[in-house]
Amino acid sequence: MRFSDEALIRVRAGDGGDGCVSFRREKYIPRGGPDGGDGGDGGDVTLVLAPGINTLADFRARKVFQAGNGKGGAGRERSGAAGASLEIPVPAGTRVTEADTREVLGELSADRPALLVARGGRGGRGNAWFKSSVNRAPRRHTPGAPGEARRLALELTLLADVGLLGLPNAGKSTLLRVVSDARPKVADYPFTTLHPQLGVVAVGPMQSFVMADIPGLLPGAAAGVGLGARFLRHLRRTRLLLHLVDLSDPEGGPASAEALAEAVTTIAAELAAFDDRLAGLERWLVLNKADLLPAQEAARIRKSLIQELAWSAPVFTISALTGAGARELATASVQRLEALEKERQFE
């Protein structure tokens, strides 16, 4: 199934049923009085969390959702049936915005498994309500109120613990394949990743986390260049970023520390331009494709790059292709996530 992380839909709650004008007519009971019943309420439209769904792809085929209308009232003070409410399943992390006003209505998560997005109209009152000492035969009733109608913009934010980022062809998809159960496309050309990928990384018993890979970033990504900017929001929920850097140059030789430092600062600038909180997340450097260089050369570049950037966060040297260093990186990541969770509990 093609990944889909945005959708525009129309929802309409049910209209309330009209109140009834009726008079009691029974043999031997003249002038029985008003007995018109109330109309039924219209059905609501609610978005509900569906754990088995992880994309918004279903909304490509269906974009209009209508709840049931309430039935009209009847004589003998019988109320009309309420309209059937409608529940629309969406994946966790779905952010709901009213398209016309840009008002954020809410976000579906385990803490908020349902969100009422359109309220049904109230049923009208029958003429029995309007009987009084001065008006014993009222012909007045009220119509049912219309249900709410809205255009909703749905935006899916993936739920992941660790996010991968870097320039195109840095080896993010290969790393995800090596350490997780995900099987993203891998090839020797840029932009093989066209949409976010998720994988569960299992390190040991009761030790696992979700890793997200987004399309590679280019300079100007925050302003819309390339593919990555559209998906940067999926990294907002992560607690740790792994910034992959290709140790080799385009010809396959060793890259200079200056060029790598420029690449790292370029990505950092794009994060800051997109979201201050995203830029403030803990970020580790992961120097990839070490298999293309002699070990001493890779160590020299690593040392020079740390000095060039004045880098104080952890740095890992790996080969995603061969798997060298990948498990160590995964183990360190889960340990850091556990430490962050303990820090959060004591805040």
Image: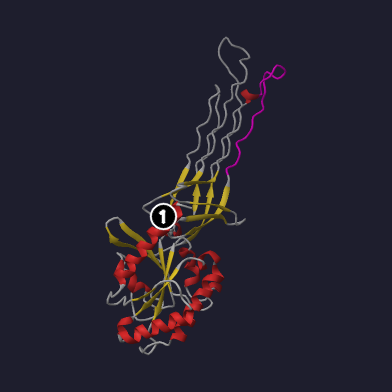
**Image side of residue 3 versus residue 11, left or right:** left
Mark 1 lies on residue: 342
Which residue is at the far right?
A: 134
Q: Reply yes or no: does residue 136 show up in magenta.
A: yes
**Image side of residue 305 versus residue 187, left or right:** right
Q: Identify the magenta region.
A: 130-147
Which quarter of the rendered picture does the N terminus lie within?
bottom left
The secondary structure that most of the magenta stretch takes on is loop
**Is 21 placed above or below 249 here?**
above
- Coordinates of residue 133 in the picture (x, y in percent): 70, 16
- Coordinates of residue 13 in the picture (x, y in percent): 54, 44
- Coordinates of residue 295 in the picture (x, y in percent): 30, 84
Q: Classify mark 1: residues with Cα within 10 Å, few (<14), some (14-19) or many (20+).
A: few
User: Who is closer to the viewer here, 185 or 21?
Assistant: 185
Q: Identify which amino acid the numbered label 1 is placed on.
A: Lys
User: Who is closer to the viewer here, 237 or 60?
Assistant: 237
User: Who is closer to the viewer here, 67 or 208?
Assistant: 208
Which picture quadrant has residue 27? top right
Residue at the image position 64 percent from the left and 29 percent from the top: 141
Q: Is residue 221 visible?
A: no
Which colouring convention does the figure follow? secondary structure
Residue at the image position 53 percent from the left and 36 percent from the top: 70
Residue at the image position 58 percent from the left and 39 percent from the top: 121
**Image side of residue 92 versus residue 37, left or right:** left
Q: Reply yes or no: does residue 347 show up in magenta.
A: no
User: Who is closer to the viewer here, 176 or 80?
Assistant: 176
Q: Is residue 151 visible?
A: yes
Which picture quadrant has residue 167? bottom left
Which picture quadrant has residue 99? bottom right
